[in-house]
Image (cartoon, rainbow, N blue to C red):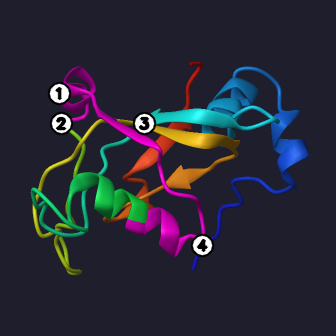
């Protein structure tokens, strides 16, 4: 077994890293005071089929993901077609074992919250593998 330590420390320590790492950390965690607007850094892959109405709409699934992490619901959801096209080459499914997503589609999204929040923010299928990661944006 091999182990590689990527880093350690608390959030203030991460924010003190030298450039360019501190800028990447700032985007992933958001500014110290938090951010209201978060945009896809990697594609959001919904965990269930998208429906036109009800709890399985795109917003419904995102809010369910947020609720499962004890986070407030998104106030506004925007689908970003250009961003979705730029994220299309990401691997969105497991190739060896595991359960594939119900629909192999990734979305580029912008989420707006009622109040500023800190990151990191990852949602959806394979969020623990890097999909569905959002970064803070200036709004």
Q: How far apart are marks 3 and 2 (CA)?
A: 12 Å
Residue 78 is inside the magenta segment:
yes
Q: Which quadrant: the C terminus?
A: top right
Residue visible at 20% across and 79% down?
99
Q: How far apart are marks 4 and 1 (CA)?
A: 37 Å
Q: Name the residue under label 4.
A: 2
> Which of pointers 4 and 2 lies earlier in the amino acid sequence?
4
Q: Name the residue under label 2.
A: 88
Residue 41: image tag = 3
Q: Is residue 37 above or below residue 129?
A: above
Q: Distance between the residues labelled 3 and 4?
A: 29 Å
Q: Give the range drawn in magenta.
A: 64-88
Crowd tier of the residue under label 3, counting other residues whose Cα lies within 10 Å: few below 14, some 14–19, many 20 or above: many
| Nearer the observer, 128 or 124 | 124
Does dot 2 land on a helix, a strand or a loop? loop
Return the x and y of residue 122 as percentages of the image width and height: 48, 55
The reply to whether callout 4 and callout 2 are in contact (CB within 8 Å) is no
Q: Distance between the residues labelled 3 and 1?
A: 13 Å
Q: Name the residue under label 1.
A: 85
Residue 127 is inside the magenta segment:
no
Q: How far apart are marks 2 and 1 (CA)?
A: 5 Å
Return the x and y of residue 72 as percentages of the image width and height: 57, 59
- Quadrant in which residue 71 is drawn: bottom right
């Amino acid at each position: 077994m091999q182990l590689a330590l990527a880093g350690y420390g608390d959030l203030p320590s991460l924010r003190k890293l030298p450039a360019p790492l501190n800028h990447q950390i700032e985007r992933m965690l958001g500014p110290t005071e938090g951010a209201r607007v978060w945009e896809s850094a990697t594609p959001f892959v919904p965990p269930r089929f998208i429906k036109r109405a009800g709890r399985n709409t795109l917003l419904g699934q995102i809010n369910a993901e947020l609720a499962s992490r004890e986070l407030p619901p998104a106030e506004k959801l925007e689908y970003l077609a250009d961003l979705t096209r730029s994220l299309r080459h990401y691997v969105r499914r497991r190739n060896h074992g595991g359960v594939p997503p119900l629909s192999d589609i990734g979305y580029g999204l912008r989420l707006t919250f009622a109040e500023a929040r800190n990151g990191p923010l990852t949602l959806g299928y394979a969020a623990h593998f890097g999909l569905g990661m959002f970064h803070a944006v200036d709004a």
